[in-house]
Image (spheres, rainbow, N blue to C red):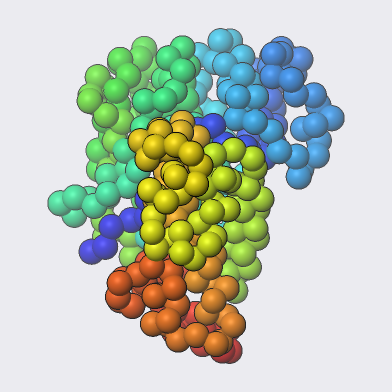
């Protein structure tokens, strides 16, 4: 059984759409809070939130979360249950249109920066279980528990919507101290959580991964993924060290030579470049994968190069390694990808 995709980002500081803040404001107003109070200090206005194509900074949403949590500290779980696949736009439609639960989870992790999470999820397979660990190490301490509860409830709600029977958890460990309202956690997740554990981990039976989804539609998921790819490319192309590295990686020789060459071109040590990328919430491997994926599609669709030639140009020693990577990116082999394109 293959491993699941790595999360596309490792830090919560990425641009976001307005839908999550709109949901938070609407939720707070239902509990008697004013929109003005909820937006205080965020720099956001109702007019900005009225633009469905609007983009805001993570720290702006974080301030809205902090305002809400200061008034309703016990309701992180409750607001998390308000997030559904449709809340996420194209990202959500691609998720529910995927062929299987595994494909949906892989897609969500690959395009995680189109979500609204602050806690970074990582999934691994172990002893017949999918262990979804929620990394809260970079969260501000004053609202870490609220964010973990919100994000975990949102993730579980969306995953459970994939199948008519849901995806029942087999276990739930949480780092936070036991709250006063334990029943709320059991009601949300269907299991009794264990508090004060070393990590936040939700587990479910790995056999659910290969369950076909009732709303699977290859045309819909292909269209939605293309839209997601374009959107995330625009967001990731913002200025900064990640963009500097990405621009240099587009040169095929740089892909083959790797991180030391890029560091030299940027007049810094490899260690400094690695640290700066970590601070930007990414890594050299993630950026290399992103560029390789884009270049692979471009080179293949020209029809002028064989799969082996493309593999060589992208720095792979063997075509089999490239095929494995391509399948992780696209969910299909290069040959099948070309057939579907009529090439």
At x 71%, y 13%, the residue is 40
Q: Along the line of sight, which residue is nearer the eye, 127 or 275?
A: 275
At x 56%, y 87%, the residue is 303
At x 58%, y 62%, the residue is 225
Q: Along the line of sight, which residue is nearer the eye, 103 or 206?
A: 103
The quarter of the displayed image where residue 29 is located: top right
Question: In the rendered view, would you say 146 is above or below 201?
Answer: above
Q: Quadrant of the N terminus?
A: bottom left
The quarter of the displayed image where residue 139 is located: top left
Q: Along the line of sight, which residue is nearer the eye, 319 or 125?
A: 319
* Residue 217 seen in render: no
Q: Position of residue 337 (x, y in %)?
A: 49, 80
Say whether residue 53 is left or right of residue 313: right
Say whether residue 286 is left or right of residue 218: left
Q: Position of residue 28 (x, y in %)?
A: 65, 20
Spot the residue most to the left: 127
At x 51%, y 20%, the residue is 75
Say whether residue 261 is left or right of residue 233: left
* Residue 35 seen in render: yes
Say whether residue 318 is left or right of residue 69: left
State the count of labels: 0
Spot the residue most to the right: 47
Q: Quadrant of the C terminus?
A: bottom right
Q: Position of residue 248 (x, y in %)?
A: 54, 54
Q: Position of residue 224 (x, y in %)?
A: 62, 62
Question: In the rendered view, would you say 198 is above or below 336?
Answer: above
């Amino acid at each position: 059984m293959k491993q699941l995709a790595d999360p596309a980002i490792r830090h919560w500081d990425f641009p976001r759409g307005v839908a999550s803040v709109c949901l938070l404001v609407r939720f707070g107003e239902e509990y008697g809070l004013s929109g003005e109070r909820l937006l205080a200090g965020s720099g956001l206005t109702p007019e900005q939130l009225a633009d469905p194509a609007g983009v805001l900074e993570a720290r702006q949403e974080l301030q809205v979360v902090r305002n809400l949590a200061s008034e309703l500290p016990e309701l992180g779980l409750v607001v998390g249950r308000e997030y559904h696949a449709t809340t996420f736009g194209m990202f959500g439609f691609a998720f529910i249109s995927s062929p299987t639960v595994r494909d949906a989870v892989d897609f969500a992790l690959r395009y995680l920066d189109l979500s609204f999470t602050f806690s970074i999820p990582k999934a691994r397979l172990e002893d017949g279980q999918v262990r979804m660990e929620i990394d809260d190490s970079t969260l501000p301490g004053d609202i870490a528990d609220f964010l973990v509860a919100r994000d975990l409830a949102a993730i579980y709600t969306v995953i459970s919507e994939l199948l008519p029977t849901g995806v029942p958890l087999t276990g739930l460990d949480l780092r936070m101290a036991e709250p006063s309202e334990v029943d709320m956690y059991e009601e949300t997740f269907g299991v009794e959580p264990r508090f004060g554990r070393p990590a936040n981990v939700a587990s479910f039976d790995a056999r659910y991964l290969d369950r076909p989804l009732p709303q699977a539609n290859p045309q819909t998921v292909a269209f939605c993924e293309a839209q997601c790819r374009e959107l995330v490319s625009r967001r990731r192309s913002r200025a900064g060290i990640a963009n500097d590295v990405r621009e240099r990686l587009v040169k095929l020789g740089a892909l083959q030579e790797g991180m030391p060459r890029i560091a030299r071109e940027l007049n810094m040590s490899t260690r400094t470049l690695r640290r700066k990328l970590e601070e930007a919430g990414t890594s050299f491997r993630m950026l290399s994968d992103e560029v390789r994926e884009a270049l692979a599609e471009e080179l293949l669709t020209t029809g002028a190069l064989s799969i082996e030639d493309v593999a060589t140009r992208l720095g792979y020693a063997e075509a089999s390694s490239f095929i494995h990577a391509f399948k992780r990116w696209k969910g299909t082999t290069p040959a099948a990808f070309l057939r579907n394109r009529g090439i």
